[in-house]
C-alpha cells in the first residue's frame, strides 16, 4: 500500500481509515467542509493528526487549493526553486507543462492569471516526480476547456510514471471516467471507499410499486416514495435481479455520490 | 549557487542588498558623523526587516505549503536560512560596531520567533519592534561596560530564541522528516 491512513482524527475528520494501492487515480469527494482539505494536509505533512496513524510511501507533492506561489518569482524561478529543493527534479517535464499551457516564463507569478499560476504550481509538483501527488480542488481556477486538457494530461502522467494521484473535488459531474477509486467524505467521516467500477457494479436503482423494502438484498442508500411508486438506490450484495413489476437500472457515478451524500445529510 | 543558498539569496536579495548599501554608506562616508542613531538602530532594522518576515510572510502568503513541501526538510530550510542570514547580519553589525553583534542576533532571532507566533507580517514586525525596544531598554546601562555586557546578554537571548523557533516549526509541520522515504 502506498498510502495508509488508520483512525486519523483532526479538526472535522473523525476516525478515518483507508488504504490506497500504488498507482491509479483516487477522487476524494465531499461537500464543502467535509474535511477533504484537512485530510490532504495531514497526508502532505502540513498538519499533524490528533490521533491515528498516517504512512505515505515515497516522495509526496501537494498542491493546495489556492495554488500559493512566491509572487516575486517568475515561473522560471519556480522551476529553479524546484531543482534546488528536490533530490529528484525533471526540468523537462516541468518546462513542457508550462510550455503546453502557454504560461509566460518571465512574468512574475503575482502578475499571472489564477489559471496560469495554477499551471506553475502543477509544473513544480510534476517536476519533482512524486510517488504520491495530492491535489486539492486542482481544477477550480481553470476554464472548462482547460479542465479537460489538464485532466487528460494528469491521467497521462499517472499512466507514464506509475505515481499515485489523490485529488479532491466537489464537482461530481467531472468524476466519470477519471477516478479508479472513490473516497467519499461527509462531515469528517468516510462513508464510501472503493474501486469505482466495483461500486458502480454494486449500486442499482430499482423502481416499482409503492413498497417499504426493495425486492433485492442489500443496503438501501436512498429511498423515495411517491403515491404509487417507490424508488430505491441499493448497494447490493451479489447481482441484483429485479422481477416484474420492478425494474432495475445501473446508476452513474454522479448519482451514486449524490445519493450517498443525500442519505447522510 | 546551489540548493538553499540560491533559494535564500533569491528570496532575500532585495532586503540584504539595501541593508548592505546602507551600512556601507554609513561606514565609508560618515565616519565622523558616526551615525550613532543608525548604529544603534541596526539591530532593530535586522529584527524588523530580516527576522520578522522570514516565516511570517510564508504563512501570510501560504507559501509555507510550497517551501515545506519539497524534499528539503523544513528544519533544514530554517537552519540554512537562519545560518546564512544570521551570518550576513553579524558581518554587517561587526562593520558598524562589534557591540552590535549581540543586539543584531537577538533582534533577528526575536523576529523569526515572532513570525511563528503571529503568522502575519505586520503583527510580527510590531511584536518584534516592541520586544526589541523593551529588552534594549531593560538592559540599557549608562556606562560602556554595561552596554558591552547587555550586548552579550542579548546575544545569549538570541541563541536561546533560535531553538525556540525550531520547536515552533515542528509544531507547525513535520519538520524533521527525511527527504526520501
Image: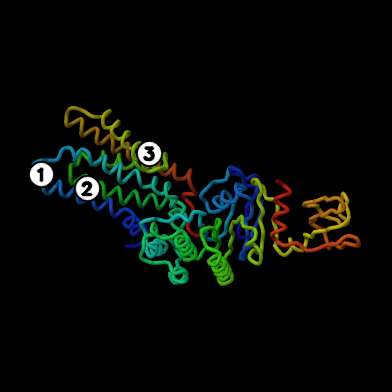
Q: Which mark is residue A134?
A: none
**Which residue is found at the position 31% from the left and 46% from the top?**
B50
Disc 2 secondary structure class? helix
Q: Which residue is mark 3?
A: B123
Discs 1/2, front: 1
- Report if the CB atoms under discs 2 and 3 are less than 8 Å apart: no
Q: Does the CB distance between marks 1 and 3 fall below 8 Å?
A: no
Identify the element where label 3 is drawn.
Answer: helix
Rate crowding at label 1 as few (under 14), some (14 to 19) or many (20 or more) other CA atoms within 10 Å: few
Q: Earlier in the sequence, mark 1 or mark 3?
A: 1
Residue closer to the observer: A67 or A128: A67
Residue A161 at what x, y percent from top left?
Answer: 55, 70
Quadrant location of the N terminus of chain A in the rendered image: bottom right
Discs 1 and 2 share one subunit: yes
Inter-mark Cα distance, 2 to 3:
26 Å
- The residue positioned 81% from the left and 58% from the top of the image is A236
Q: Secondary structure at mark 1?
A: loop
**Viewer-nearest of discs 1 and 3:** 3
Describe residue B163's horizontal placement relative to residue B34 as left or right: right
Q: In this orientation, does residue B181 appear?
A: no
Q: Earlier in the sequence, mark 2 or mark 3?
A: 2
Identify the residue shown where x is 47% and y is 50%. B176
The residue wearing badge 2 is B92
Front-most of residues A15 and A58: A15
Mark 1 / mark 2, whichever is N-terminal: 1
Between marks 1 and 3, how big is the CA–CA gap? 35 Å
Is residue A120 shown above or below B33? below
Q: Chain of mark 2?
A: B
Tags 2 and 3 both on a single chain: yes
How far, Cα to Cα, is label 1 from label 2? 15 Å
Amino acid at each position: 500500500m502506498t498510502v495508509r491512513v488508520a483512525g486519523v482524527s483532526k479538526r472535522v475528520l473523525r476516525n478515518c481509515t483507508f488504504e490506497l494501492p500504488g498507482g491509479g487515480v483516487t477522487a476524494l469527494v465531499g461537500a464543502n467542509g467535509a474535511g477533504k482539505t484537512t485530510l490532504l494536509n495531514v497526508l502532505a505533512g502540513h498538519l499533524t493528526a490528533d490521533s491515528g496513524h498516517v504512512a505515505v510511501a515515497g516522495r509526496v507533492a501537494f498542491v493546495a487549493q489556492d495554488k500559493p506561489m512566491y509572487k516575486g518569482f517568475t515561473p522560471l524561478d519556480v522551476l529553479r526553486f524546484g531543482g534546488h529543493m528536490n533530490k529528484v527534479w525533471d526540468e523537462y517535464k516541468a518546462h513542457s507543462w508550462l510550455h503546453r499551457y502557454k504560461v509566460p516564463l518571465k512574468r512574475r507569478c503575482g502578475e499571472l492569471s489564477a489559471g496560469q499560476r495554477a499551471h506553475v504550481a502543477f509544473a513544480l509538483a510534476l517536476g519533482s516526480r512524486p510517488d504520491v501527488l495530492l491535489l486539492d480542488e486542482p481544477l477550480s481556477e481553470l476554464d472548462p476547456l482547460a479542465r479537460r486538457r489538464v485532466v487528460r494530461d494528469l491521467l497521462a502522467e499517472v499512466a507514464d510514471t506509475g505515481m499515485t494521484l489523490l485529488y479532491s473535488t466537489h464537482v461530481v459531474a467531472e468524476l466519470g471516467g477519471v477516478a479508479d477509486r472513490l473516497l467519499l467524505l461527509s462531515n469528517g467521516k468516510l462513508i464510501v471507499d472503493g474501486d469505482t467500477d466495483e461500486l458502480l457494479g454494486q449500486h442499482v436503482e430499482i423502481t416499482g410499486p409503492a413498497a417499504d423494502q426493495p425486492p433485492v438484498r442489500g443496503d438501501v442508500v436512498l429511498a423515495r416514495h411517491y403515491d404509487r411508486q417507490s424508488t430505491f438506490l441499493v448497494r447490493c450484495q451479489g447481482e441484483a435481479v429485479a422481477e416484474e413489476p420492478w425494474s432495475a437500472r445501473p446508476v452513474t457515478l454522479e448519482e451514486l455520490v449524490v445519493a450517498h451524500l443525500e442519505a447522510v445529510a | 549557487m546551489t540548493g538553499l543558498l540560491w533559494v535564500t539569496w533569491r528570496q532575500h536579495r532585495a532586503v540584504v542588498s539595501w541593508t548592505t548599501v546602507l551600512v556601507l554608506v554609513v561606514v565609508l562616508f560618515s565616519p565622523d558623523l558616526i551615525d550613532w542613531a543608525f548604529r544603534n538602530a541596526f539591530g532593530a532594522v535586522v529584527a524588523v526587516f530580516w527576522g520578522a518576515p522570514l516565516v511570517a510572510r510564508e504563512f501570510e502568503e501560504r507559501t509555507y505549503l510550497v517551501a515545506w513541501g519539497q524534499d528539503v526538510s523544513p528544519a533544514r530550510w530554517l537552519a540554512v536560512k537562519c545560518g546564512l542570514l544570521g551570518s550576513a547580519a553579524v558581518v554587517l553589525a561587526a562593520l558598524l560596531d562589534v557591540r552590535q553583534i549581540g543586539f543584531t542576533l537577538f533582534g533577528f532571532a526575536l523576529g523569526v520567533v515572532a513570525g511563528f507566533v503571529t503568522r502575519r507580517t505586520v503583527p510580527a514586525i510590531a511584536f518584534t519592534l516592541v520586544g526589541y525596544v523593551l529588552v534594549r531598554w531593560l538592559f540599557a546601562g549608562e556606562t560602556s561596560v554595561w552596554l558591552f555586557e547587555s550586548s552579550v546578554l542579548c546575544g545569549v537571548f538570541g541563541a536561546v530564541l533560535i531553538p525556540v523557533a525550531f520547536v515552533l516549526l515542528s509544531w507547525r509541520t513535520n519538520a524533521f522528516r527525511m527527504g526520501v522515504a
